[in-house]
Image (tube, rainbow, N blue to C red):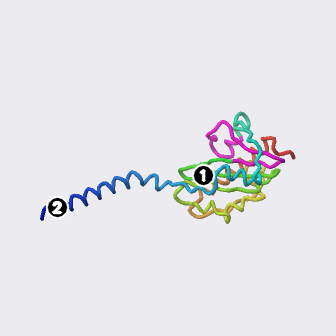
């Protein structure tokens, strides 16, 4: 082999090695890249036609913490939840683990019924169909049953069972928090 060929071969081998190292380092972040459908601010603005109220807070303590634990099956990872309320309409931005990563969901409630549920950020590598209106529209007009679940069942999606369950739990949690927030005047 000539000197030029040997030098070129070494350069190609070095370039392949560098490329492999870059791919190994970048692969986890590429695999878990989040799909952002709407920012929190955009969701709140949309929910209140561009003039949202000031946020308020519900503390997760005592009975409220117990009920949220019953709804989710675990403690919510925050001591308080921020929400927006105006004229019996509340907006909630909540997170719940799908299979391995959190899903950020926005829920708008009018009086005691869900008027909108939107996936704001989806981080899992599969099951993203839960973010489509064909799925999320099922939550409209749902209310909370006495046992803390939704009053009507939600159809699942094959391959996205854990994400479907996460959104269903968050819908129930938002309805419950709405009922204890003072926003519902009924």
Residue 153 image position (x, y, % from top left): 72, 59
Closest to the observer: 29 or 100? 29
Instruction: Check disc 2 and report its element: helix, strand or loop.
Output: helix
> Is 84 in the magenta?
yes
Residue at image point 44% right, 52% down? 28
Which quarter of the image is occupied by the N terminus? bottom left
Q: Which residues are magenta?
A: 67-92
Closest to the observer: 124 or 10? 10
Closest to the observer: 133 or 163? 133
Please give the label number shown on residue 6: 2
Residue furthest right in the image: 186
Residue 36 image position (x, y, % from top left): 59, 55
Distance from disc 2 to disc 1, alpha carbons, whole Å, reads 52 Å
Instruction: Check disc 1 and report its element: helix, strand or loop.
Output: strand
Number of the front mark, 2 or 1: 2
Residue at image point 84% right, 47% down? 87
Residue at image point 77% right, 49% down? 51
Q: Is residue 50 left or right of residue 87?
A: left
């Amino acid at each position: 082999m000539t000197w030029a060929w040997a030098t070129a071969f070494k350069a190609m081998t070095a370039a392949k090695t560098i490329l492999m190292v870059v791919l190994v380092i970048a692969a986890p972040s590429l695999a878990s890249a989040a799909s952002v459908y709407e920012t929190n601010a955009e969701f709140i603005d949309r929910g209140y036609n561009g003039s949202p109220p000031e946020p308020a807070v519900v503390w997760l303590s005592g009975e409220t913490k117990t009920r949220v634990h019953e709804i989710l099956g675990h403690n919510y990872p925050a001591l308080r939840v921020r929400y927006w309320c105006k004229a019996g309409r509340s907006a909630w931005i909540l997170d719940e683990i799908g299979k391995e990563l959190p899903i950020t969901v926005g829920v708008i409630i009018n009086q005691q019924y869900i008027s909108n549920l939107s996936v704001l950020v989806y981080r899992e590598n599969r099951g993203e169909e839960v973010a489509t209106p064909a799925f999320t529209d099922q939550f409209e007009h749902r209310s909370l049953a006495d046992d803390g679940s939704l009053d009507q069942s939600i159809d699942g999606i094959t391959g996205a069972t854990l994400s479907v369950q996460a959104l269903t739990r968050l819908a129930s949690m938002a309805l419950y928090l709405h009922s204890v927030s003072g926003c519902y005047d009924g």
